[in-house]
Amino acid sequence: MLTPPLTFLTDPARLAALAETGLLDSAPEEVFDRLTRLVVRTLGAGASTLTLLDGERQFFKSAAGPDMPPIRETRMDHSLCRHTAGLGAAIAVADTLADPRMCQNLTVTRLGVRAYAGVPLVTSDGHALGTLCALHMTPRAWSVDEMATLADLAEIAVAEIERRRAGERPEHGRASLRAADGLIRAMLQQSLAGIFVVQDERFRYLNPRLAEIFAADEAWLRERTVWDVVHPDDRASAEAYAQGQLYGPPRAAHYSLRGVRADGGVVWLEVHASRAEVEGRAAAVGLAVDVSERVTAERERQEAVAARDRFYAMASHELRTPVSAVMLYNELLLGETYGTLSPEQHDAVERSQRCAADLLELINDLLDLSRLESGKMEPRIEEVELVALARSAVAAVEVLAAEQECTVTLEASERPLLVAGDGKRIRQILLNLLGNAVKYGHGRPVRVRVAREAGGAVIEVADLGPGIPPADQARIFEDFVRLDDAADQGTGLGLPIARRLARLLGGSLEVTSVVGQGSTFRLTLPG
């Protein structure tokens, strides 16, 4: 993530443009307060500020929302908005603790802001004077529609700020205020999200998009209570949310429910709502987004995953027995239990045995993949001595290495080197890495290194083979991907399964490679 330089804060030209607005340290004004209230209502945010950035502080020209403390300014080290203004572009952060720019900010660590969305207020001559932002006290994603709404409102704020720079003041700006009201009204009417105000269980206001979502006209919705258009199975939970909003502590709510359309169809909705007062009485203000296509797509995905898992289970259980029988009869033939084979017959049976072994490997890989994807594979955590385990894995590939005229060496920084893990699964990962290194190393040496690292241990398997092109280094961990120039194509599941196993054990599996010089696979494991 980019961290913009903050030297722009003290740029004399920017500070002069800010001074021209006359807004620093000025009293709250309805034209700006209306914008922050709209941010809270339409985005379901816990708070919103219209922030102006001075050289060493941020000043809140306007602030709204149940989670906004009663302050007008903070030091710059509390400012999340400085990153938005410095970048000169919108920023949406779903979890501030996971964002390196913001995780140490005092607004996050002391005030508990966990989600942030901001749009810079950039003048026509390119000066970022501040931001219009939305804040939330729990992690949440910001949709494309929500960011577009925030950007529209920020444009209205910039237009008002430009008028101030031109010398127009509120007492002479009623025409400007009317123009801003017109922009806001147009934005509400054309929004891609359904916007509503509910009071006394009825729609006090709704925009055309909400009526479209319910396949109805506005009159049809106004004639009904809110509960008439909520699916009966979701009514109890929706009522609980509503009671909490209207009579509990001030807060914004985000929840999902099913709606009933005018034609009887069901629509899936994500609702963002918060409490407000309309003519002195409690009301709920918010927006509803139709997510039916997303819900349908997720169900189809789950059904496809279930069908795939059923196929994997069938393949692993129904095919394993006949393949094992074929391999057994091949062994009997090769052992000349049924008589002496001619050289041609012996060669044919050996080829049959290799094909059967490859098929059994694919079946076993499918079974492992199915268990990993469904979460049914549980690691058996025990104390593992990594050097001994690595030595046994190297010994297991000695025959293959001899066939390839390849030497495999083991280096260990200490012994014993103990970690908590699943020895069987770690060995499975190592055998896959060693097998690939030997097969694709073209007879060149393979080096295995086992070492202690802070908080755990690392095992590296390095070869001097042809290397992997940068474009393919991510693809090799995808299911069924096999590089075109591979001498032995394999199943295309070994590395994807190895990486999943590494993550199952709390570690990771990565690769570094240079074409023409070789590859190094690095398995890290927790202590």
Image (tube, rainbow, N blue to C red):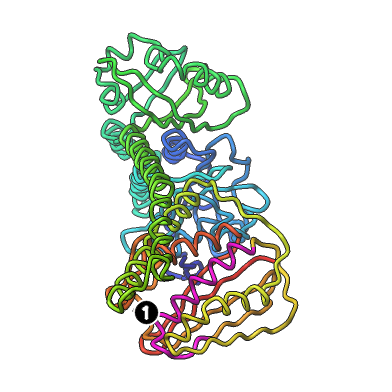
Judge the density around disc 1: few (<14), some (14-19), many (≥20) Cα neighbours within 10 Å: many
Residue 361 percent coordinates (x, y): 42, 62
Q: Which amino acid does label 1 sit on?
A: Ile
| Image quarter of residue 150 | top left
Residue at 68% x, 57% y: name it.
Answer: 381
Residue 160 seen from this side: no
Q: What main secondary structure does the magenta stretch of the protein show?
A: helix
Residue at 28% x, 28% y: name it.
Answer: 209
Observer-nearest of 22 and 311: 311
Q: In this view, does 467 lie above or below 206?
A: below
The answer to whether residue 32 is left or right of residue 63 is left
Observer-nearest of 485 and 14: 485
Q: Circle 1 sits on which residue?
A: 468
Magenta extent: 423-446
Q: How many marks?
A: 1
Residue 67 percent coordinates (x, y): 59, 38
Q: What element carries label 1?
A: loop
Name the quarter where the C terminus is drawn: bottom right
Looking at the image, the residue that sits furthest to the front is: 339
Observer-nearest of 327 and 22: 327
Looking at the image, the residue that sits furthest to the top is: 223
